[in-house]
Amino acid sequence: MRKMLTIISNVLRGSASRNGAELVSEGARVVVSARTYADFTPQATFDIKKCDLHKLEEGPPLQAMLSREEGLQYYRTMQTMRRMELKADQLYKQKIIRGFCHLYDGQEACAVGIEAGINLSDHLITAYRAHAYTLTRGGTVREIMAELTGRRGGIAKGKGGSMHMYTKNFYGGNGIVGAQVPLGAGVALACKYLGKNELCVCLYGDGAANQGQIFETYNMASLWKLPCIFICENNKYGMGTSVERAAASTDYYKRGDFIPGLRVDGMDILCVREATKFAAEHCRSGKGPILMELQTYRYHGHSMSDPGVSYRTREEIQEVRSKSDPISMLKDRMLSNNMASVEELKEIDVEVRKEIEDAAQFATTDPEPPLDDLCNHIFYNNPPMEVRGTNPWTKLKSVS
């Protein structure tokens, strides 16, 4: 060993004495790096948990293939979501973010897995825990953070806040519990009417699952065979009430009755991805709607006004973190199958943290929208019009 170190030391000393030594050294590093990356496993197959089925003869596969590129992308996206939500928590406690704010940390495998199973040309609508979906649908961290702080550079120009963010083919961010479900069915009806082989993913939580409008929507979607994937993100608590105390039946995937259903491990991104692919194929083949229940968990309380430990113990939260964390699960799979190195994943973590810090800096320095913008964008593609203010004598202009 000592002899080997001596040889390496002499080589380096000799290289350093020549002109262009830095270039030689850098070139050597690149060669070593390339050789190291070539040694990684390009793809691997993993066993995944079997889904519980309702009115289906067969379900998603019990194995999922993951490429190295996919794994790294999933890891980066989930880490970005996690860090973004933790930064939002910090800014809220500093009173820089105000009002309603519902965080998604712990549920990242749901958003990333769903997006991996559909196309960007498909449509998606969700409730008010919407930051992560805004990101997967094409929004940037900068736009999301600026929207949270109510700034002009926000994705809704600072007028929507935490619950009302939108991008192309993403319809929010809806504040009324359960109201997005019939809207999502309407989007699915448009998909069928236009004949573009697109579908709508319609998300709601276990707390909304007892809403009458959801069952009315099931009925219409089934009658009209709408290409709609209804997804219940069951994070075990509707606000501060456990599902066992709120629902006579907690088999949410069976709630569609006449609609086929799947119960999926929502903490495993590969389970979610494969189940979503299966559900999407069901819809695209003209079989009508399908229902998925994703069993997941949120680490924060219902919203920032809820400490999240009055109806559950800290030990319960810690146990889920230690045994079922979606990011840790993906990381362990990749490392144990030689699909990535610890250093490479740490480098991603550093890049993500920098992106979040830069976005937070922008979100706290970008100007707030001026009063003149207040009534803009009420209508789409309309000529400018006057809007009455707080009294008949105050007039504001609205521009589409």
Image (spheres, rainbow, N blue to C red):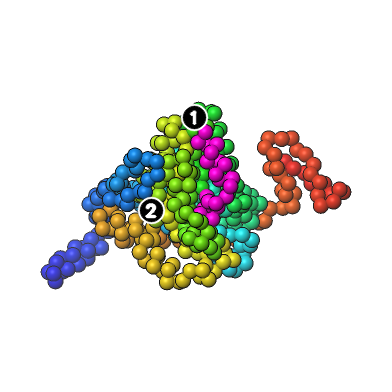
- The residue carrying pointer 2 sits among few (fewer than 14), some (14 to 19) or many (20 or more) residues within 10 Å by Cα, namely many
Residue lying at 17% horizontally and 68% vertically, measured from the top left: 5
Residue lying at 25% horizontally and 55% vertically, measured from the top left: 337
Quarter of the figure with the N terminus: bottom left
Q: Is residue 222 magenta?
A: yes
Side of 106 where 47 appears, left or right: left
Tell me: residue 194, above or below residue 307: above
Residue lying at 39% horizontally and 61% vertically, measured from the top left: 325
Residue on which disc 2 sits: 265
Question: Which is the main secondary structure of the residues drawn in magenta?
Answer: helix
Identity of the residue furthest to the right in this view: 393
Side of 258 where 39 appears, left or right: left
Q: Earlier in the sequence, mark 2 or mark 1?
A: 1
Percent x, y for residue 329? 34, 58
Is 88 or 205 nearer to us in this picture?
205
Element under label 1? loop
Residue 196: numbered disc: 1
The residue type indicated by label 1 comes to Lys
Tell me: residue 83, above or below residue 378: below
- Residue 190 in sight here: yes
- The residue carrying pointer 1 sits among few (fewer than 14), some (14 to 19) or many (20 or more) residues within 10 Å by Cα, namely few
Element under label 2? strand
Is 275 or 376 nearer to us in this picture?
275
Magenta range:
204-223
Is 221 or 196 nearer to us in this picture?
221
Q: Would you say the residues marked 2 and 1 are in contact, meaning their CB atoms lie under 8 Å apart? A: no
The residue type indicated by label 2 comes to Asp
Q: Is residue 217 magenta?
A: yes
Tell me: residue 268, above or below residue 4: above
